[in-house]
Amino acid sequence: MTRLFSIFFVAILCISSVYADRMGFGSQYGSLSIDYPEGFKLVDQNAEGTSFHIQSSGTPVQAIVRIYDKGRYKTAHDALSMSLKAMKLTGDCEDVKWRNQNACIATFTGKLLGSSVAGFGVAASIPDNGTIVILDWCEQNQAQVYTPFMTSLLDSLNIDEGSYWEAGIITQYLYPKTEELLPISLDINGTKVNSLLRANDTEAADYLIEREYSVLCMYANTTMWKEAWQRYYRMIFRDSYNRLQRVSFDIYNELAPQSKDDTDLAQKLLNWTQGFSYEREKNISDFASLPAILTGSGSDCDSRSMLLAVLLTSMGQDAIMLVSNVYSHAMVAITSDHQGHSFKYNNKEYLMGETTVPGLTWGKISSNQNDQKKWIEVMFP
């Protein structure tokens, strides 16, 4: 079976907007949501508000989302296989463990709306609250081109709050958490920090980055480029957070006792990233995955800024990322009561952090990059 997937079904009682294109499912379903690619529109829904048909305005991809009440199906496998059967689609279903819940993925082909289609499906148990099934597809002769788009959609499913901080169902299936660990040693301002990554973290992170970059490129000449850019970094943040959680814990344990406050701790990390070798990645996205940086790969401004945003967020600090197509640059920012140059987002003042110029402290940036209107904020959960 092809180990790549996309969406078809989404079930929603109400649609709320956390981000520009995040579907929420109503308070009774907790944190259940989909951070789907930009530009989807609602085509149809059932009277009960538990089945939705959505269609991309910029690609030939369509999707259906459905939520089934608790007890309707014994397993996610049953829900997905029966959905395919009901729609007379041919596909293979494979079980996967995700978020400590039973889940299932599938590839399928068949006829929908008079066309020969190919697509992907997922089903997952909603903790204590039923099952969600998502199927997405496009015409069969276009499936190879839009596989990244479809799998990205499925991978953005969140079944609980913890989903926002861990790899999505597709990435988890392709790169299961391995017991094999990779020791790493970091020198942060003269302090040695020993930690561990999973052996396949770099490969998994690289996969997600390249897939999401191919999705981002689909919006290059559209009015949705800004929102697509923000989602690109959100997806990387989500995938990276859990991969670096142990590293963040070990760094904090070593550096926090030496630090006056959170901003002093953040300064030690900022100084550390300012000393990285500046290298352009040889991959298509030109973005170094965070596990790769920690194992010695080069980096540039956006990967360094993402690294600090992940580590500082994991340490309990309020961190965001800023990107600018005008300045061709990226920075990280934190809330702090220290003095310095700041921008205001969501009624909070954020101190800027320049990761590429050695010696700069939080709140100091180049004077020719201080126009807030030319920066795009990337907020994280």
Image (cartoon, rainbow, N blue to C red):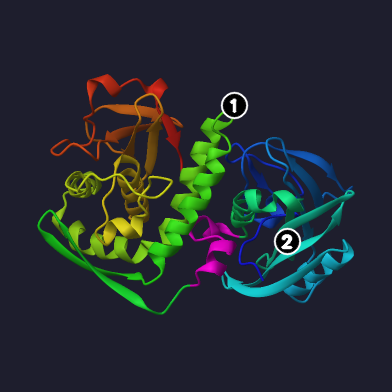
161 or 374, which lies in front?
A: 374
Q: Is residue 97 above or below residue 126?
A: below
Residue 45 spot, x, y in % from top left: 84, 46
In the image, the segment drawn in magenta is 160-176
Mark 1 neighbour class, 10 Å CA radius: few under 14, some 14 to 19, many 20 or more: few
> Residue at the left extreme?
190
Residue 294: name its quadrant: bottom left
The kind of residue tagged 2 is Ile
**Height in image: 122 above or below 39?**
below
370 sits left or right of 45 in the view: left
Q: Magenta stretch: residue 166 in it?
A: yes
Which residue is painted at 84% across and 43% down in the image?
Answer: 44
**Residue 332 in view, yes or no:** yes
The prevailing secondary structure element of the residues shown in magenta is helix
Q: How many marks?
A: 2
C-alpha distance separating marks 1 and 2: 31 Å
The picture quadrant where one finds residue 37 is top right
Residue for badge 1: 223
Q: Is residue 111 left or right of residue 171?
A: right
* Amino acid type at image mark 1: Thr
* Vertical order, 346 against 44 (above or below): above
User: Eyeballing the image, is 248 above or below 25?
Assistant: below
Q: Secondary structure at mark 1?
A: loop
